[in-house]
Image (cartoon, grey):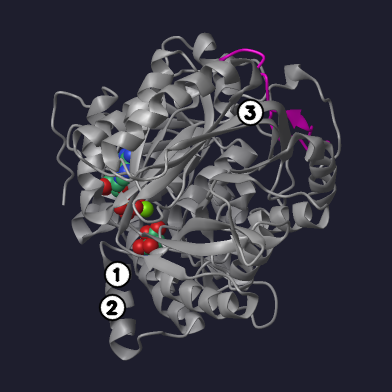
Amino acid sequence: MALIVQKYGGTSVGSVERIQAVAQRVYKTVKAGNSLVVVVSAMGKTTDGLVKLANEISPNPNRREMDMLLSTGEQVTIALLSMALQELGQPAISMTGAQVGIVTEAEHSRARILHIETSRLTRHIKAGKVVVVAGFQGISSTGEMEITTLGRGGSDTSAVALAAALQANFCEIYTDVPGILTTDPRLVPEAQLMDAITCNEMLELASLGAKVLHPRAVEIARNYGVPLVVRSSWTDDPGTWVTSAKSQGRSLINLEIARPVDAVEFDTDQAKVALLRVPDKPGVAARLFGEIARQKVDVDLIIQSIHEGNSNDIAFTVMTPILKRAEAVAAAIAPALRSASNPKADEAEVMVENNIAKVSIAGAGMIGRPGVAAKMFATLAEAGVNIQMISTSEVKVSCVVDAAECDRAVTALSKAFEIEAGENSLETGVYPLGQAEEQGSRGAEESSSPPPLRPSAPLPLRPSALLPNCPPVRGVALDLKQARLAIRQLPDRPGMAAKLFGLLAQHNISVDMIIQSQRCRVIDGIPRRDIAFTVSRMDGENAKQLLTQVAAELGWGEVVLDSAIAKVSIVGTAMVGQPGVAAKMFEALAQQQINIQMIATSEIKISCVVAQDQGVKALQAIHTAFGLAGTEKFVVPA
Ligand code: ADP
Ligand code: ASP
Ligand code: MG
C-alpha cells in the first residue's frame, strides 16, 4: 500500500462535473489500496477573479488582506471535493493550510514553508479518510498566526512539501496538459511530451517561464528526493516523471529555507574573449558563434551586454588550451562585423584575458531569494576581489575574477555560505545532477554531511559523451513577465555589484539575468562599466526609482528601464561540451530577423532577451530549430 499525494490544478477542478471526476479518480486510487492526501487549487480562474476584485478597490492592496482574500479560493474547493468523495461513500475530510499546520514565514504573498505538522494528517489517514488540503496557503508561526499564501501557482509547492513531510511514496500533479512538454503547447501546438526530465532541467525551465510546475515545488522534490510526476486530469496516461537523486536525509525543519547554497565551485582553467563594439543588429551573434562552432571550439559562459549607441559587447569564456583557436576566430571575424555595419565606427576590438577564474555558488535554495547573490557580491567585495563578469541561472551565480584572486574568493565564499572543504576530487564530479542521476553514478548530491567544494572543470567526462542519445536541448521556455534595467557608468571597483544588488535585495527585488559590460571607460578619472539585469516586470518601476535616487547620490550614470522585453531560453543538461548549441539558437533568431538584446548562459541553459512583440516568434523558431516540434498539433482543453 502506497501513500500518495495528488494535486489537482484550477482547470481540473473548474466545475462541479470536474470536481466529481476528480473524486472518481481519488476513489479509484483508494480502492486500489492506497492512502491519499489530495491538494487542490481554487476552481478555474477564481484566484484571478479575486485579484481583480481587490484591484477594483485598491491599486496597491495590503498584502495581509490579499492573503486573507486569496486563500478563500482553495477553501471552496476542499469542501466541495470532500462532499463529492463522501457522496461516493469514501470517508474524507477537508483541511485548510492552518488546520494541517503548514507553518510558513510571516511573509505575506510569498511565504516559504518552514515545516509541516504531520500528526493530524496521519491520524485521519489511519482512520481511513482521504484528507483534502487547501493548496497555496499556510499559517505563520510567529506573532499572530497569520494566514499566508505561497505565491501564485503555489499549490504545486504545497503538494510536494506535503509529500516530503509525510515521506509519501510519490507526488502526482494533475493538470490540463498530459505532462511536461518541450515548450508551452498554447504557444507552440507542435510541442511534444517528454517521458522524463531531470529536476535540474525542470528547475531551470520552471524558473524561466514554464508555468506547468512552480519552481519551488521542483526545488523541494530535488532537495528531498520526492518522486514527482505531472499527468493529465483527463486521461490515464503515464505523464512525465521529474527525476531526482535518492532521498538525502535532509532535516524537515526550515524546509524551504534551510540552506540556499550547497556548493562553491571554481574553475581556474578559463580564459575570456571579448568582442567590443559589434553592431547591434540581427545575425551578429549567429555569425560569430557559428564560426566558433565550425572550428569546434566549445564555449562556456556567453554574455552580451546592453548596447550603447548602436553597438554591443559580446564576451565568452573557453578553456585555456583552446584560447588561441577561439581568439583567432574572433580576430578573423571582427573586421567583417565592423565594416558591415558602420565603416566609420571604431573597429570591433578583440580583447583576450588569460588569467581568469570562474567562481560559482550553486544551490536550488537561492530561487527567489534576492539576498543570496547580493551576499556573494558583498563577500567578494570584502575580500577585495573585483568581479569582471557575472552570469546567473536560477540555481547558480558565477563570477569571473582574476585568477590570482581565485583562492581568496573561494575561501571567503565557503566561509560566508558555511560550506566546508570536503573531498576536493574530480570524481565528485561537477556535471549537473541530472547526468549523475541518469548514470546512477552518484548518489545524493546534497548530503547532510559537509558539502564538498567542487572544482568545476575540467569535466571528468563530458555528459554528452556519456549520454549519446540525449538531445542537447530538452525544453524551450518564454518569459514575458520581465523588465530590463540598465545602469550606465558604474565605477569598476570591488563592491559596486554588492552595493547595487544588496540594495535591491533589501527591497525584496529578485534579480534574474545580470550582465556587466566588457567595455570600460574612464570618466572623471574613474574606470566605469555599464551593468544590465532583468527583474520581474512588477518590480521594474520600483527598482528604477530606487536606483535613480541612489545613482544621483553615488555619481552613477543614467538608469534605464525597458519593460517591453521577452526572455527566451533553451535548457538541457547534455548541452555541456557540445559546441554549436548556442550558434544554432542565435542562427534561428537571425533567420527571423530577431535582434538579441542580451545573452546569458549557465552550463545547462542559454537565455536571450529580445523585444517583447517578437517573443512568441522567437520561441517557435528556436523550438523548430532544435527539432523539438512533433507532427501532431496539440490543443489544450479550455
Ligand atoms: P494548473 O492550474 O493545473 O496548476 P497551470 O496553468 O498552472 O495548471 O499549468 C499548466 C499550463 O502550463 C499548461 O496549460 C501550459 O499552457 C503551461 N505550460 C507552459 N510550459 C509548459 C511545458 N513546457 N509543458 C507543459 N505545459 C506548459
Ligand atoms: N490558486 C492559486 C493561483 O491561482 C494557486 C495555484 O493554483 O497553484 O495562483
Ligand atoms: Mg499551476
Rendering quarter of residue 504: bottom right
Q: Are marks 1 and 2 in contact (CB under 8 Å)?
A: yes
Q: Is residue 451 magenta?
A: yes
Which amino acid is tagged 1?
Asp
Give the quarter the ligand 2 occupies.
Answer: bottom left
Distance from mark 1 CB to nearest ligand 2 atom below 8 Å = yes
Find numbered disc 1 in the image and state the secondary structure of the residue it sits on. Answer: helix
Q: Check disc 2 and report the residue beneath it.
A: 52
Q: Check disc 1 and report the residue beneath it.
A: 48
Q: Check disc 3 and report the residue beneath it.
A: 271
Q: Earlier in the sequence, mark 3 or mark 2?
A: 2
Residue 528 appears in the figure: yes
**Magenta-highlighted residues:** 444-462
Task: Measuring from the top left, give residue 561's x and y in whole percent.
Answer: 40, 67
Q: Nearer the viewer, residue 375 or 591?
A: 591
Would you call the spot at circle 3 few (<14 residues within 10 Å), some (14-19), or many (20 or more)?
many
